[in-house]
Amino acid sequence: MAQVLEFKLPDLGEGLTEAEIVRWLVEVGDVVAIDQPVVEVETAKAMVEVPCPYGGVVTARFGEEGTELPVGAPLLTVAVGAPEGSSGSGEDSGSDPESAGGSGNVLVGYGTGAPAARRRRIRPDRLDRSVTEAPVSGAPVVKAPVLEAPVVKALVADASVSEGPVPVVSPLVRRLARQHDIDLRRLAGSGPDGLILRADVDRAIRTAEETATATARAAQAPVQAQVPAAAPNGVAAAVDAERIPLRGVRGAVADKLSRSRTEIPDATCWVDADATELMAVRAAMNAATGPSAGPKVSVLALLARICTAALARFPELNSTVDTEAREIVRLSGVHLGFAAQTERGLVVPVVRDAHTRNAESIGAEIARLTELARTGKLSPAQLTGGTFTLNNYGVFGVDGSTPIINHPEAAMLGVGRIMPKPWVHQGELAVRQVVQLSLTFDHRVCDGGTAGGFLRYVADCVEQPAVLLRTL
């Protein structure tokens, strides 16, 4: 006899509270194995394939592709075969996760490692006790039903109120409908065999309230001349406009940037630097042959190594501010974030322990993380925990910018394009490879002298790479 188990959206880590369904990997009626990925979701940080801890037949899916679900909301239900040796009546003893169809594997805050709940056959006269409040979705959930479909149909047919049979078995649902004057006969139940659930009644209540509000507003609105109404942004309402929801990666970026501008009193300083010698050193490194030759080193990797050397001299910029404790927290290690533009938007992968790596190691890690970013396979852990960010907007053909700090960090270094410009070199006018460097910093962690010292050191290393030899 089958047991229907509900699989809810687990906590995917890093404090994420919701995810958007990108693509279902299974259909209703498909047979799934334990830990088989069943849906691909997009969080505010990454694309994740979610495995189901149960093995059986998919009986229902919750949410279409593009739907945003909160953590804890139902994802799907799976009909799992009863454990061998269980009797068809009375109470079955608890079993381990494997015998109940669960994997025992754990995502963050979720798992089937605890003993399975004891099942019992639901007597028709006690059916209401099998319905409980779902803590997140608000819809009643039947606990591990062991009833065959014909039995459910019979119970639903027998359920009645004074006005005739209605497909409802929960008195809670009936009471809620009566309190809000909802005619249950007009509702199409979303439960098994058309069973009306609390979610159906809640939906009908919201619809009725929205309709009543719209009607009241229409009745109170004064008659106005037919002039195009102004939208919130000042554009006439008659002009066609596309509304794009701020969710997923774009929504997370919007929230973080807004928080940065709201909380951090930032300031920016910048300087032009002659990068001719840096480019020559890079060319020499990449042209080397023989046993000592390594992989190609990018300009970004060299700049990242310069940043770690600068942060060792100016640790104030490798810190964060604890607003509640009113303390500046200086961090011992450098986890270097770098901005990467992808089809899904801007992401900031993090090179862990960048202060312990040389330019070659940093370059290899940047290349690895960039490839994961382009394919949407970065994990949330690879996108969080940065202590300082390097933003190379020169790849877009831009000379300068004032970066917004990646909250809760204290600074970000921006790098413009490197291009030939007239420059005074050794007392003579010459054409040199010039780059603009800009540093946005949290004025709470340091004053302008410290920020200027950091930026000047970075510029000196760009102009004279031999300066780095002092710290190697």
Image (cartoon, grey):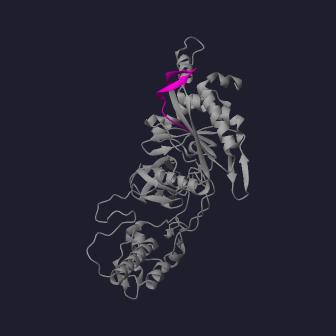
For residue 207, side relative to residue 145 (left or right): left
Furthest residue in direction top, as rendered: 290
Total label count?
A: 0
Residue 364 seen by the camera: no
Furthest residue in direction left, as rendered: 226
For residue 229, side relative to residue 119 (left or right): left
State whether residue 262 is above or below residue 34.
Answer: below
Q: Nearer the viewer, residue 457 or 181?
A: 457
- Image point 53% across, 23% down: which residue? 279
State whether residue 359 is above or below residue 324.
Answer: above
Q: Nearer the viewer, residue 61 or 319?
A: 319
- Give x and y (percent) for residue 6: 50, 60
Q: Nearer the viewer, residue 318 or 445?
A: 445
**Which corner quadrant of the image does residue 319 belong to?**
top right
Instruction: Answer whether residue 206 is magenta in the image.
Output: no
Residue 294 seen by the camera: yes
**Which corner quadrant of the image does residue 311 belong to?**
top right
- Give x and y (percent) for residue 202: 44, 74
Q: Main secondary structure of the magenta part?
A: strand
Bounds of the magenta segment = 414-432
- Give x and y (percent) for residue 274: 55, 27
**Which corner quadrant of the image does residue 273 belong to?**
top right
Quadrant housing the C terminus: top right
- Image point 45% across, 58% down: which residue? 68
- Give x and y (percent) for residue 317: 67, 42
